[in-house]
Each structure stands twice: as C-alpha cells, then as structure tokens.
Image (cartoon, grey):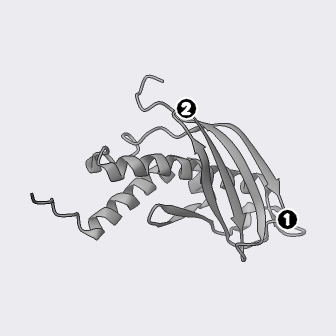
Amino acid sequence: MSRSRPEPVQVIKKRRDKALSALVDGIPYSQFLGIRFDRRGDELTALLPFDEKLVGNPFLPALHGGVTSAFLEITAIIELSWSMLWEEMESGQLDPQKLDADHLPRLPKTIDFTVDYLRSGLPRDAYARARVNRSGRRYASVHVEAWQDNRSRLFAQATGHFLIPSRDNDA
C-alpha cells in the first residue's frame, strides 16, 4: 500500500497565508486601522502598528478606547474564523483554488463583546491573541488579550460571544 506524497511546505504555507489574507481583507476597518496578523502554524498574533490617527487623548497620549475595542473584536473574529477554516483546509474539504473572499465562510456575527481596559494604551505598537473557549455549530465564546511591550502586562482584555453563520448561503 503506497501513501501519497505530501505537499511541499512552501505550497502549504502559501495556501494558509492566502486564506488568512482573504479573511483579514473581509474586514475593511482592519485595513483602515492597519491591523496585520502574524501566523505561526495555526496560532495567530494580531499587530496594531502605532499611528497618530489612533490616539484618543493627545495629552497622555493614549490609544482611543474605540480603537482598542475594535482591535480586540477584530482579533477575536479572525481567530474564530481561522479556527473554523483551519479544520476545513487541513482536512482537504476546502478547495485550494477557492481561497478568496467569495468562497470563504462568512464571518461570525458579534452577539456581545465586553472589554476590560486595564491601563492606557501607550503610543506604540500593540499585540493581541485570542483563544476560542467554546465553539459549537451556532455559538462561540472567545477571550482576547492585548499587550504592548510585555506580554504579561496586558493593557486590555475582552470576552465575546459570536453567532456562527451556517455554511450554506441561505442564512
């Protein structure tokens, strides 16, 4: 019994990067904020590069609370979508030729999102990681943590609940 030859690593990485790029491009506000994602295997780290337009209080200066909230929510949505997409990509259910915005699953819808502002976001790059606590067929719970210079010194965290869209195009 012969096994099929595995795909070259470069092909797998290119397919994963293309899928992640299509997911992120599905949220226009993330492009406005400049949010990028660093992928290591199935783990994502969000990056919010500092820009003067993100400052809410110029006297401190501090990142705007709405920017912080949006950064956390986008990170949660992309992580949840990525975890669903990852299973389909790795199991071969997703056609590699159809990795674009028209063929990817719709993004989850936010039911509620609670942000804890732990300290002011300083005028520098920010990072975030999300963890899917529970994911069923229709509902998911996600926790997100954001930091700047030191991962153990968070400046914000959030918990969100999301409605997962059905895979068919009817809903």
Residue 96's label in the rendered image is none
Task: Provide residue 163's location: percent of width, then percent of height.
Answer: 59, 34
Q: Is residue 113 left or right of residue 116?
A: left
Q: Are marks 2 and 1 in contact (CB under 8 Å)?
A: no
Task: Provide residue 170's location: percent of width, then percent of height.
Answer: 43, 22
- What residue is shown with label 2? 138
Which element is circle 2 on? loop
Compared with 45, 77 (above or below) is above
> On the image, which quarter does residue 157 sit in?
bottom right
Q: Nearer the viewer, residue 117 or 42?
A: 42
Q: Is residue 139 left or right of residue 120?
A: left
Task: Provide residue 98's location: percent of width, then percent of height.
Answer: 30, 45
Quarter holding the N terminus is bottom left
Q: Is residue 31 left or right of residue 13?
A: right
Task: Provide residue 92's location: percent of width, then percent of height.
Answer: 29, 48
- What residue is shown with label 1? 119
Residue at 38% x, 59% y is 16
The kind of residue on which mark 1 rests is: Arg
Which element is circle 1 on? loop
Residue at 29% x, 69% y is 9
Compared with 2, 168 (above or below) is above
* Residue at the farthest right position: 59
Q: Nearer the viewer, residue 3 or 51?
A: 3
> On the image, which quarter does residue 18 sit in?
bottom left
Residue at 67% x, 52% y is 143
The kind of residue on which mark 2 rests is: Arg
